[in-house]
Image (cartoon, helix red, strand yellow):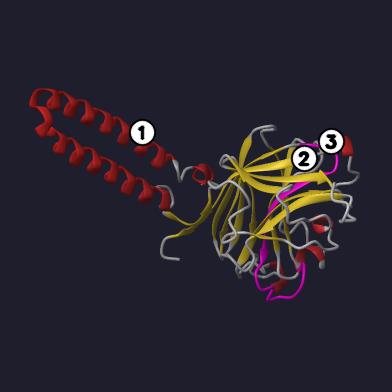
Amino acid sequence: MGKELVSPYIGLVIWQILSVLLLVAVLVLIFCFVRRCGYKANLLLLLVSSSALLLAGCAGKELAQKSQAGNWALVWADEFTTDGAPDPARWGFAPRKSADWACYCADTLATTYVKDGQLYLKGIINQDKTDTAKYKTACIQTKDKFAFKYGRIEVKAKLSRGKGSWPAIWLMPQDSKYGGWPHSGEVDIMEHLNYDTIIYQTLHSGYIDRMNQKTNPVYFATTPFNVGEYNVFGVEWYPDRLDFFVNGQKTFTYPKVDDADPSQWPFDEEFYIILDQALGGNWVGHIDDKDLPVQMAVDWVRVYQKEGD
């Protein structure tokens, strides 16, 4: 199960390599044929090479949409291929508000931009004299643009470290049908603090945070990650459990408990995605300006669902 988390594109890569090798072999044969037959073979060269490229492209697209393991189908993704601001069809800026994670949110390219195939989310010292906030941070979300119920989400990201740094990848309910936080749930796929060499994966609900039911079942895990490198953080979400992963390895499972209070499982509605690089707060602690800027670089975000769901 764990290794399925990073496997959906392995088949695509293998197919593309084989397609390139096949195309090279075909072109070599055609080149030899052209040398023997002259200009009349040019049309054959064009037809064969075009057909090979078309077949490779179609097969690659099919493999990109379907995981060979577990019958997962890609339903939403951002590969961050266009420089500039994040795609407005996929992402919006989360507003600044009093919550610790959002108190410095800013909708500016100084903190949030795409370059060379990466999304950069930064926490910086504010140089804008018209803004009284001391810092600016990146906070983007798919609220009202994309939300999903059940499936698998993976995010490939690299974290920098610094005193007061708090990057996060998480899910929040689109409609909050069970009421305000924490009653409608929160799924924290990855949170990192300061200079830690671990990341935190956590759930929140009325059952956990208001009824203080934090051991039956266990609601969080701390897991080592590859410091200074890209890591894949993910969760598989089913009607009866949430499985958390780091780099393809399952870290913990939070199950639905049939005889528990109903507030234990608000995870049956659509959730949207949040990516942010926060600074400071009660949990994280003091911000050291000498460590700024800090950033989370995101290579891609992918969401899958089981075919037929």
Residue at mark 3: 291
Q: Is residue 166 magenta?
A: yes
Query: Is residue 150 shown above or below 161?
Result: below
Q: Residues within 10 Å of mark 3 (few under 14, many from 20)?
A: some
The mark closer to the camera, 3 or 1, is 3
**Label 3 with label 1: CB-CB less than 8 Å:** no
Picture residue at 72% right of the left edge, 43% below the top: 199
Query: Is residue 162 shown above or below 309?
Result: above
**Residue 142: quarter of image:** bottom right
Quarter containing the C terminus: bottom left
Image location of residue 169, percent across then percent down: 68, 51
Image location of residue 103, percent across then percent down: 84, 57
From the viewer's perspective, tell me whether residue 64 is left or right of residue 169. left
Picture residue at 77% right of the left edge, 40% below the top: 294
Residue at mark 1: 17
Q: Nearer the viewer, residue 278 or 212?
A: 278
Q: Is residue 176 magenta?
A: yes
Question: Which range is magenta?
Answer: 161-182
Image location of residue 145, percent across then percent down: 59, 66
Q: Residues within 10 Å of mark 1 (few under 14, many from 20)?
A: few
Q: Nearer the viewer, residue 25 or 308?
A: 25
Amino acid type of the residue that numbered disc 1 sits on in the rendered structure:
Ile
For mark 2, give the secondary structure: strand
Q: Nearer the viewer, residue 9 or 124?
A: 124
